Image (spheres, rainbow, N blue to C red):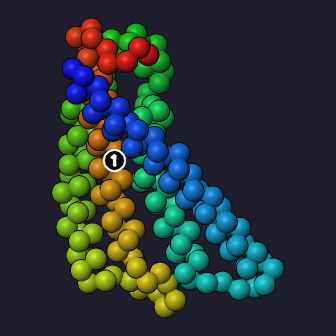
Amino acid sequence: MEFIKKAVAFGESINEWIGKVIVTSAVLLFILVIFSNVILRYVFNMSFVRMSELEWHLFAFIFLMGAGYTLLHEGHVRVDIFYSLMDRKKKAIINFFGVLFFLIPSCWVVLSTTIPWAVVAYEIGETSIDPGGIPARFMIKAVLPLGYFLMLIQGIILGIKSFFILIEKPLDHS
C-alpha cells in the first residue's frame, strides 16, 4: 500500500510540476508571440511565417502538456449536471470505469499511432513546408505522444484512487 501511495504521489507531482512550471511558461511565451505578431502586423505592416507557426505550435504544446495537469485537478469537461450531484462513491465508479474503458484505450490508440509518426518525423528531420517556417516540425509531433502519455499516467492514477475509494480504503483524505 505504501508503494502505491508513493507511486501515485510521484505521478501527480510530475503533472503538477509540468502544469505549474512548463505549461505556465509556455502560456507566457504564447502571449508574447501573439503580442509580437500583432505589433509587427499592425504597426510595422510585417508578417513572418515562423512567428505564425510558432503560435499554433505553442497552443498545441500548452493543450497537450496541460492535459495531465487538467485531469489531476478535475478540469476536463464532463456532464457535471449529473456528476456534481453524485456522492464520492458514485463519482469513483464513473471515474474508474471511465478510465478503464475510455481513457486508457483512447490513449493507447493515440500513443500507438503517434509514436511511430513522431519517430519518422525526427528521422527525416521534418521541417515546415512553408518557406521561412519552423525548421523542426518534428518537435511538435513529439509532444503529441508525450502529452497523451502524461494524461495516461494521470488517468491510471485516477483509476487507482477511484478503486481504493470503492473498496473504502482511500489513498488520501480528500
Question: Residue 163 appears in which quarter of the rendering?
Answer: top left
Task: Write the residue at 73% across / 79% down.
Answer: 41
Give 143 or 172, whichever is nearer the viewer: 172
Q: Residue reaching furthest right?
A: 43
Q: Circle 1 sits on which residue?
A: 150
- Quadrant housing the C terminus: top left
Q: Position of residue 40 (x, y in %)?
A: 73, 79
Q: Is residue 142 above or below residue 161?
A: below
Q: Is residue 18 left or right of residue 106?
A: right
Q: Is residue 77 left or right of residue 104?
A: right
Q: Position of residue 16 (x, y in %)?
A: 45, 40
Query: What is the number of callouts on the image?
Result: 1
* Label 1 element class: helix
Task: Write the residue at 28% across / 43% down.
Answer: 152
| Residue 170 visible in the snapshot | yes
Q: The residue under label 1 is which amino acid type?
A: Leu
Question: Residue 139 appears in which quarter of the rendering?
Answer: bottom left
Q: Is residue 15 left or right of residue 107?
A: right
> Which class describes the residues within 10 Å of circle 1: few (<14), some (14-19), or many (20+)?
many
Task: Write the residue at 19% across / 67% down.
Answer: 116
| Residue 160 visible in the snapshot | no
Q: Position of residue 120 (x, y in %)?
A: 22, 76
Task: Write the residue at 68% across / 74% down.
Answer: 37
- Quadrant housing the N terminus: top left
Q: Is residue 51 above or below residue 141?
A: below
